[in-house]
Structure formats: structure tokens, C-alpha cells
Image (cartoon, rainbow, N blue to C red):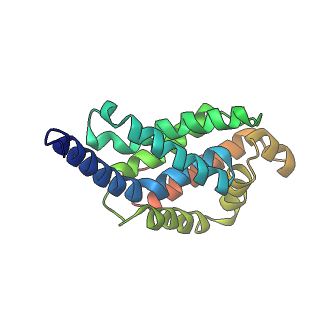
Amino acid sequence: MDKTALPTKMARNNNLDSFEILMHEHQPMLQSYLFGIVRDRHLAEEIAQITFIKAYKNLSRLQKKSSFPAWIRKIGRNTAFDELKKMNREVVTDPEIFLGMEDVFSRYDDSRQADNWRERVNEVKSCFHKLPERLLNIAKMHYQDRLKAKEIASELSLNLATVLKRLERARNSIRSCLGQPTK
């Protein structure tokens, strides 16, 4: 065996082991994030796998280990858009939604409030279901049924400003429930 190849092979194995740990730690977060984009659980899982392969191949480009969660989400987001384009599927690319998603996910990047992403997602779901009914109904229509605020206002015969305010209150209630400062 060539003795010069050994350190390279060992370094590659150490990188793979470290990456595998990162992958298992961040997979639930990435899949949740991608589901928010593609709205299809199986497709989100598939895109997450493609994302991890791309990330591993480009691991040398990651400048700070602490920025891994944001870095993997960016690769995932771009991969999701590429996959949707290949499938000739449109995705609603409302910048406010993506900023909101990134805001929620980035708050947990450094957080140690929960042991893993599944617990964190469950915390958000629990807080979501604790919303007062008038906020919960509008939040469900917007985030689960993917209706725009104008559509909700029309369907419920409400003023657009009322719908927007209730969505803001719902987000603030969830933040408060999670122990985060409200905006």
C-alpha cells in the first residue's frame, strides 16, 4: 500500500464521518424547510438527499462550521427550485414567506432549547394549535391551505388589513409561546 495515500484516505474518512454526523443532526430541519417550499413530503426528502450529496462534494467551500445550517438551507433552496423547474411545477416565491421561513429556522441554528429538530417542529406545532380560534383559522388558511391574504379576506368577508394584522398577531403569539421576542 502506498504510504502517501493513507493520510488522504484517513482525512476523507474523517470528513465523511463528521459530515454524516452533521447530516443526521440537520436532516429533519432541512426536510422541514424544503417541505415549506415544495409542499410534498416525499419530494422534500428526495431533495434533501440531493442537497446533502451536493454539500458533501462542496464541503471545502464551507468557510465556518457554525454557518452549516444556513449554508445547507441555501443549497437546499436552490436545489428545490431546480427540481421544481425540471418538473415544470411553479412554486409561490413570495419573498415575505421565505424571509419568514429563514427567520424561524435561523433562530434555531444557535438555539439549544430543544434536543433536535423534530422536537422543535413539535414545539412550533403545539404553539400553533394554542392560537385563539380567530387567529388559528386565518393562520391555517394562509400557511396550510396556502391562500394569500387577499383570498382569505374575500372568503371570510374581512378587510385585508384585518387579515394581515391577525397573521402578524399569530406569528407574534407563536414567537411568544416559543419564548422568543416578538417583533
Classify residue 15 as left or right of residue 78.
left
In the rendered image, residue 129, in percent from the top left (x then y), is placed at: 61, 68
Quadrant housing residue 8: top left
> In the rendered image of this protein, does residue 178 appear above or below residue 7?
below
Asked whether residue 78 appears in the rendered view, the answer is: yes
The residue lying furthest to the front in this view is 1
Of 22 and 176, nearer the camera is 22
Residue at figure coordinates x 72%, y 60% from the top left:
137
Front residue (pair 183, 125): 125
Residue drawn at x 33%, y 50% as measured from the top left? 19
**Residue 56, x across and y down, in percent:** 39, 42
The correct choice, above or below, for 23 with respect to 70 in the image is below
Q: Quadrant of residue 159?
A: top right
**Total number of numbered labels?**
0
Q: Looking at the image, which residue is at 59% across and 35% down?
A: 96
**Residue 122 place in picture, x, y as percent:** 51, 67
Residue extending furthest toward the left: 3
Q: Front-most of 140 and 108? A: 108
Tell me if I can see residue 183 in this picture. Answer: no
Residue 154: quarter of image: top right
User: Horizontal and vertical percent for residue 136?
Assistant: 67, 61
The relative height of residue 163 versus residue 59 in the rendered view (above or below) is below
Q: Residue at x 71, y 45 (%)?
A: 162
In the displayed structure, does residue 144 sit left or right of residue 55? right
